[in-house]
Image: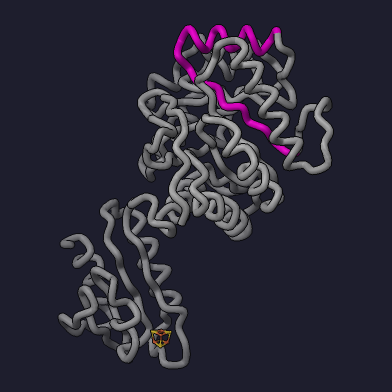
């Protein structure tokens, strides 16, 4: 794995992004921002599963003003997602937004960007230049989408720098994974700012998690990326869970348990798929970094999962309980989950 690209750090509220800080997990609310109670409830739920920065859509004045009340009900830093109307960014700043996301595809006039940058600078609020392949500025025209995305970001960066504004974060998202990777690889060596990485509109839980894991995972492996958002057509809790799974797969963050489960085969004498799914559900409530294994047979189970802190190697009607690859007891099928979870709690 490549060493991490070290960027100029910025602060989104109390959260540091870049500068070698741990990679930050973000998500976006899917409530109507004007519905303050629902939005606060969703943000609190996301915070419980580990979300560190939350973005809210700001399509109108009422949404921008709602940020003030939302902030009173939550502790996560809030980023206002702004498109088209520069004055919404000003209203969101006035309401206390901790960060702004601007799309250079629809807010690019120097005068408007300058007014936003001035107001953001006064409050020490960073701006994410959020380039999206689906809404590129019309002025840029190079051969590939990745190059156009990079150009759009560089133009906006130059404009902000000319205004003496450097609280910048950049994202270059496309649905196409190779395009996204190329764009981030290209810009990573050209700018000193932190990168927010993700695959846009990646799809439903099953497909979107795979696209995101391939795209985000490839970039992270190359040392690129300071904060991630997994965009899914699903409840945002799934985005946060997927984000941590990506980070844990690359040993970049520890967050809650890691579940090791065998794929099952003809040696298995229990329904290992059902059992592993039940254990996975139970583990969602555990926050400590414990490695748990659910294996389908006593022959290969403990050996295959020798790095697990605690695990089950199942046989017909019973299972061997093992810790760190060593057998420590035998339990009955009716006690599989309760015993395993008790050991996880104890660990
Ligand atoms: Fe098959 Fe046993 Fe390996 Fe599971 S642990 S895949 S049941 S050999």
Which residue appears at 28% of the width and 71% of the height?
308
| Quadrant hosting residue 249 | bottom left
Q: Magenta residues: mostly which secondary structure?
A: helix
Which residue appears at 38% of the width and 43% of the height?
50
Compared to 306, does 13 lie above or below? above
| Quadrant hosting residue 342 | bottom left
**Residue 98 point in image, percent of width and height:** 46, 21
Q: Nearer the viewer, residue 289 or 141?
A: 141
Quarter of the image with the C terminus in it: bottom left
Compared to 219, does 249 lie above or below? below
Q: Nearer the viewer, residue 181 or 73?
A: 181
Which residue appears at 72% of the width and 31% of the height?
151
Compared to 272, does 187 lie above or below? above
The magenta stretch spans which residues?
111-133
**Residue 112 point in image, percent of width and height:** 69, 10
Ligand 1 picture quarter: bottom left
Q: Is residue 197 left or right of residue 272?
A: right
């Amino acid at each position: 794995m490549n060493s991490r690209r070290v960027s100029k750090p910025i602060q989104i509220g109390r959260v540091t992004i870049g500068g070698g800080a741990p990679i930050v997990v973000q998500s976006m609310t899917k409530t109507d921002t004007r519905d303050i109670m629902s939005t606060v409830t969703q943000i609190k739920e996301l915070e419980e599963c580990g979300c560190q920065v939350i973005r809210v859509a700001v399509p109108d004045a009422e949404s921008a003003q709602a940020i003030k009340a939302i902030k009173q009900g939550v502790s996560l830093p809030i980023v206002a997602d702004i498109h088209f109307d520069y004055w919404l960014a000003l209203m969101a700043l006035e309401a206390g937004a901790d960060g702004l996301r601007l799309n250079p595809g629809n807010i690019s006039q120097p005068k408007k960007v300058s007014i936003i940058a001035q107001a953001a600078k006064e409050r020490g609020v960073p701006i994410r230049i959020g380039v999206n392949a689906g809404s590129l500025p019309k002025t840029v025209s190079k051969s590939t989408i990745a190059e156009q995305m990079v150009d759009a970001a560089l133009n906006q960066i130059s404009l902000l720098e000319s205004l003496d504004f450097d609280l910048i974060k950049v994202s270059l998202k496309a649905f196409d994974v190779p395009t996204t990777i190329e764009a981030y690889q290209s810009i990573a060596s050209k700018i000193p700012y932190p990168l927010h990485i993700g695959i846009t509109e990646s799809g439903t839980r099953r497909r979107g998690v795979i696209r995101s894991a391939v795209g985000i995972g490839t970039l992270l492996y190359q040392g690129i990326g300071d904060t991630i958002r997994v965009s899914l057509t699903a409840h945002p809790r799934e985005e946060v869970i997927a984000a941590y799974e990506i980070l844990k797969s690359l040993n970049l963050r520890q967050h809650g348990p890691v579940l090791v489960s065998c794929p099952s085969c003809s040696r298995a004498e229990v329904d290992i798929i059902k059992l592993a799914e039940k254990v996975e559900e139970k583990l969602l409530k555990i926050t400590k970094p414990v490695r748990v294994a659910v294996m389908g047979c006593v022959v290969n189970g403990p050996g295959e999962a020798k790095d697990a802190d605690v695990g089950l190697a199942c046989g017909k009607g019973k299972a061997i309980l093992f810790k760190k690859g060593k057998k420590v007891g035998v339990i009955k099928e009716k006690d599989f989950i309760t015993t395993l979870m008790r050991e996880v709690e104890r660990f």
